[in-house]
Image: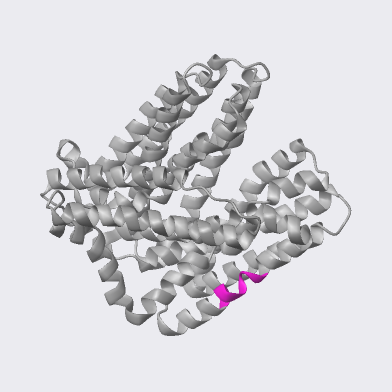
Amino acid sequence: MLGFSSGLPILLVFSTLSVWLSKAGVARGTITLFSWAGFAYAFKFLWSPIVDKINISFFSKMGQRRSWLLIVQILIIISLILTSFTDPQKNLKITAICITLVAFFSATQDIIIDAFRIESVNQNKQGPLSSMYIAGYRIGMLIGGAGSLWLASYWGVEQYDQSVWKKVYLTMALLMLIGIFANIISKDPSKFQIKSKNTMQHLRLFFITILSVFIFIYLYSIIQKSYNDNFLNFLFTTFKLALCFIICGTLMYTLTKIRVVNKNLVNKSYIEPIKNFIIRYGKFAVIILLLISLYRIADVVMGVMANLFYLEKGYSVSEIATYSKFFGVFATILGGVLGGYFAFKFGTMKALFLGALIASMSNLLFAWLANVDTNIQFLIMVITADNISSGFAGAAFVVYLSGLTSIKFTATQYALFSSLMLFLPKLIAGYSGSWVDVMGYQNYFITTAMMGLPVLILIIWISKIAPIK
């Protein structure tokens, strides 16, 4: 149920919102700008120390994790209700503000639930627990994505009517009560946590951190340059990201020096969790971080082009929706259950290796699909295999990341790992359309499969030097 609570809001921020804005007549270029709300998920590790250390006294009897979770779940519901009453045709900025609040509180909920899950059971039970979490997460995504669009269609979405989308988002807000119910009947694992008494200093650090994130987004948006060469575009984007990080880091360093922010608090919030990880894994820490940043690269880079490939191959939108978005979710859940069970039965590293292997090999099925006639049975077979392998790899990786975290810094370390996990794959995936233009779909899918080979080598290496059982 907590996985469902995590998965429900994310597509309300992205795909469902895009359809709403499109029906409202918002320009395509403006709609894509709303994806910047997703920066909340990318930067969530920055405010994870607040969640990790500050205890909410008003709900202190519930425990640290459950009290934070209840507050955030209520704020998600309020944000969804506020969003439902906005009309992007009349005031797009208000819609943008409300949907950003949904993304921010949703990302914060992910921080808490990840920590909740890791602290609730020992490492040998993380596999089954991760499987159930992923199953709930995918069902939540199914309801928030396909479910919300089905409701919009049922209530009449062909002609724009704000009241239709109002009912959709209010219904989704009501479904968030499932997560609140799960929270109420759960036991809090906060006995492991070390609380901080410097609440005001933490809040000051929090607001300055959020300011730094907004500065990062603004700088990234105004630095524009385009090259004809894809590799040069990739290098420029990498340079732009590095420059924005350096400027925001310099700002934080300056504020620390002039004592606007407490230096010891910054060290405890950001430096100590990283130092703790490096001390525990020593010189192999960099190799482990490299594995984290590359593990999902094959399926993430491939997945960006999947829907466009289906359309250009000649499959209808209804076929894609039915087999990719609906049945594909259940195939992913099955893969997640298998991945969690395999990790529980045979160990994390073996599950991690098998997940990376089948996730890469499934891309070769897309290369085959690109070279055969359009056939719905072929589509079903490839989508099912891809989703099962993706679910398996996802569950195994969640178990692995859970094992890497220290109980002292659960929320902060896991938030950092999960942010790092998608950073490089998403950066590379942004150029996938240009790659297809150059090499065609078949060679593109083969190339993405080959991206998984270094991951397999890293897993074999790490399993010998720094394994997690």
User: Left or right of 216: which side holds 361?
Assistant: right
The x, y position of residue 346, in whole percent, is 51, 74
**Of residues 318 and 213, the one drawn nearer to the viewer in this rendering:** 213
Identify the image's colour scheme: rainbow, by chain, secondary structure or one colour: one colour
Magenta part, dominant SS: helix
Residue plotted at (75% across, 59% down): 438
Please indicate whether residue 418 sits to the left or right of residue 456 in the image.
left
Q: Which residues are magenta?
A: 450-456
Q: Quadrant of the C terminus?
A: bottom left
210 vs 235, left or right, is: left
Residue 63, picture quadrant: top left
Q: Quadrant of the N terminus?
A: top left
Looking at this view, name the residue that lies furthest to the bottom. Answer: 464
Number of labels in the image equals 0
Residue 295 % position (x, y)? 53, 66
Q: Answer with the quarter of the image where residue 263 lies.
A: bottom left
In the displayed structure, does residue 27 sit left or right of residue 118?
Answer: right
Residue 347 visible within the image: no
Residue depicted at x 54% and y 67%: 342
Which percent across, then down, holds residue 373?
89, 53
Q: Residue at x 43, y 60 (%)?
A: 420
Q: Which residue is drawn at the image coordinates 59% and 21% (left, top)?
A: 24
Location of residue 417 with respect to 48 vertically, above or below = below
Q: Quadrant of residue 121?
A: bottom left
Q: Position of residue 413 (x, y in %)?
A: 33, 61
Determine whether 266 is above or below 342 in the image.
above
Residue 302 covered by magenta stretch: no
**385 or 412: which is nearer to us?**
412
Location of residue 461 with respect to 4 vertically, above or below = below
- Could one spot residue 269 in this view of the protein? yes
